[in-house]
Image: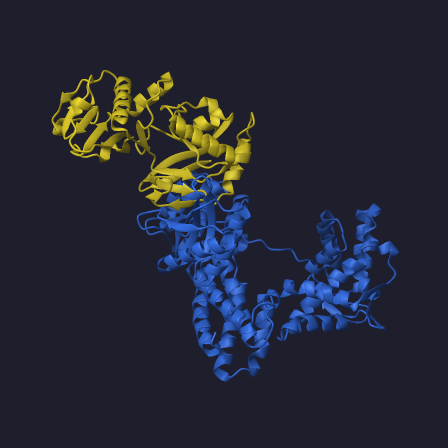
Chain colours: A blue, B yellow
Amino acid sequence: MAQEFLVGFRLAEPPRTAEALEAALSEARASLEALGVAVKGWDYDGSERLLLVHLRAPPEMLERAAESVVHILSEVAGAEAKLERLSREVFARAQSVIPSPPVAGFLLRAAGSRLEGYPLGRDELLALLLFYFAGCSFERAILAAPFLGLDAEAVKAALHGLAGKGYLDLAAGALLKPAERLLNAAIPALRAKAGRAGDGIKVVDEEGGVETFSSEKLAASLYGSGTPHSLVPAILGSVGASLRGRSVVSKRALVAMVSSLLEDLEPEAGAGARFASYIYALDKVYVRAGSSLSKLRWSLLRGFSREVLGERGLTPPPRLVELHAELVAREIRELASSAPWEFEGRVLEIEEVKRLAELAAPKVSVAWLELRSTGARELASRYWSRGVGDVRAAAESSDCAERKELALRGVLLLSSALLLSAGTLPSNFVGVNLGALRSRLPRSPGELMFSVARFCSLSAVVARSPAIAAPRESRRLAKALAELAEVAERLASAQRL
Amino acid sequence: MKLRIPLGSRYLELELTLARIDELHPHEEVIPEHLERLKAAFVASVHQRNPVIVDSRTGCVLDGTHRWAAMKDLGYKWIAVCRVDYLDPLVELDSWARLYRVGGGSDVARLLPGFELEPADPGRVSERDLVVAAGAVYRVPYGSVWEAYRKVREIDERLSSLLGAKPSYVARSSVEGASARGVAVLPPKLRKEEVLELSRKGLLLPPKSTRHVVPARPMGVNVPLKMLSGDSIDAELFEEYLRQKRPLMVKPPLILDREYGEAILYFS
């Protein structure tokens, strides 16, 4: 079982630069992940030349982790270090006081809200949330309170009150049934919900192509066209209100609506014209290859994307090609609409488009970049061991948001490793990877197919689980993670990873 | 920021805040070489790493006299402090015994001529006695604790010069019996009220007189020195600065620059 420790290293000489130390610790963080060891923080006391590293690790891995840090400090920062005895057992036991940033943020937001309509008073509900997210530790809850803007004395009194009402067992550090029921209802209700007005409406373009309206895409286009950021929320709100009750809207109407809103809000900036120019920029871009000139179409862009992403000898999944082409298109739009009043048409050399495509590739697939210097098999193996380490660390994390983050990263790495070993280029997105894996299922042998299918559905459960989890949701994720670790083991032996 | 540290069934209240450097007062003298080293370290640093521990009622510096003096000398107007109720029984006060290594036998009367030394029965020595032990045990009579500690300083100076070495310091409460292979000087155990009274009067005890054990202390707070150099401070800003820290509770003992026997709230 992983526990938290403070590990000390005495440096023979001060590090050359603070950046060198930072880089070494960052390298150590990545390298220790494969051992199931998480570097949670570090602090360097220059006057004592003492580096303190906060690790969460299974105790039996500490020696190895410490050796690894010493090695990396020497390799990356050029700093010779030796393990320092911080307690009688060398490694000092430590415990984080504050929950992870997403959980702390949730508690800060809860503390700022009125929390009405619950069977408990505001202070009691806040104390209950704090106790639950502090791993049901009374001591941690009291210590963490002032860091979340809560009065420790009031939290203490509220927790004793809750124990008296049968919500908590303070001695056992446990929630009782009424508290679990309340948290199962309150936490999902307190989680933020994005207003997505207009989402789901069909947008039909000039050529009859249909896509679904998305506020995110509209926001990205607004930012891309150089619309002042302060105007974006107002535009999204107005467009959402205008689309209410409709099931379909034409692209032209949508662009007109946004342009007129921009003209109303920022008449002197020419933002309306700039936006329209940005949206239709691709219509005025031509690509020259030798003596031939072609209009830039989506099919051409997808072709470039497929070619560039396929340079490493692995097949890029269609969704990854799509995402990449959209990114390249955004770059070209920005380039082409930078001066709309002068812009009539623009000819891009094919090399320029390819250069943009290469620059965009790591944004959708970091593996594409890593494969430049590493073989697919080696990278798959590296991803696999890091992914297994992350899933293992996630299963042992008591902080729900940290567990989700580790689990998601683990799933991303494991799915990437599986795709690499199947000759497919992985993406930076869990959803894309799982889609690509699923599409390969019919071609896999029976036993492997079953394991990959189970891996995909468990990974989807993990990916969709909320970071700020109620007790019931937390148990569901824990169960999925435990099974995911078993499936990963089966897959590792089948794939020889 | 007010912290409540649960310690079993009890709580220690600490307040991490900024204090005007002039409003604090020490109770011990500084060691000049140590002070100069610390001043050089502050000049090279951008942070006050650890807060000074002070009594919340009187502003008496309980732990961190050298840091306080170094920052005062360097012209800082403010200092990060951890206020604690000194009279809380959870805060313990002990004294530091001095242990001198002496080759061969040691005759206290020969080492300390001119000092009034009363042979004493080791079993009947009280913690309020000033004791010198080297095989045999001697009580050094004194009138007031101030006088007792002046005698401790004289004995220290005498033995250090005679033996050519500084003593090692250990908690008086941990010294058992008389040392046959060296000289042990056991200053009388002070009362908290006496420490506060001497400090209030500006009567400073020699360095390494008191040994305070606060059962939990914040460390690694790293308060930017630029926050402490102005004439005024923004308390709310400082509180918010602290709130973004992610402290660790480290169980004792923790060995850093020395061994800390208390729980450490480490603001990494």
Residue B143 in view in this figure: yes
In-image side of B93 versus A129 (left or right): left
Who is closer to the viewer here, A175 or B98? B98
Position above or below: B46 against A110: above
In-image side of A326 versus A143 (left or right): right
In-image side of B230 versus A335 (left or right): left
Residue found at x 76% / y 73% = A299
Please identify the quadrant where the N terminus of chain A is shown: bottom left
In-image side of A275 versus A369 (left or right): right
The spot of residue B56 in percent (x, y) is 40, 27
Q: Determine which quarter of the picture holds residue B33.
A: top left
Q: Determine which quarter of the picture holds residue B256.
A: top left
Residue A461 in view in this figure: no
Residue found at x 42% / y 41% = A48
The spot of residue A288 in percent (x, y) is 82, 69
Residue found at x 43% / y 67% = A482
Q: Determine which quarter of the picture holds residue A57.
A: bottom left
The spot of residue A311 in percent (x, y) is 66, 72
Who is closer to the viewer here, A37 or A151? A37
The spot of residue A450 in percent (x, y) is 49, 79
Position above or below: B173 against A10: above
Say how many tags the image has: 0
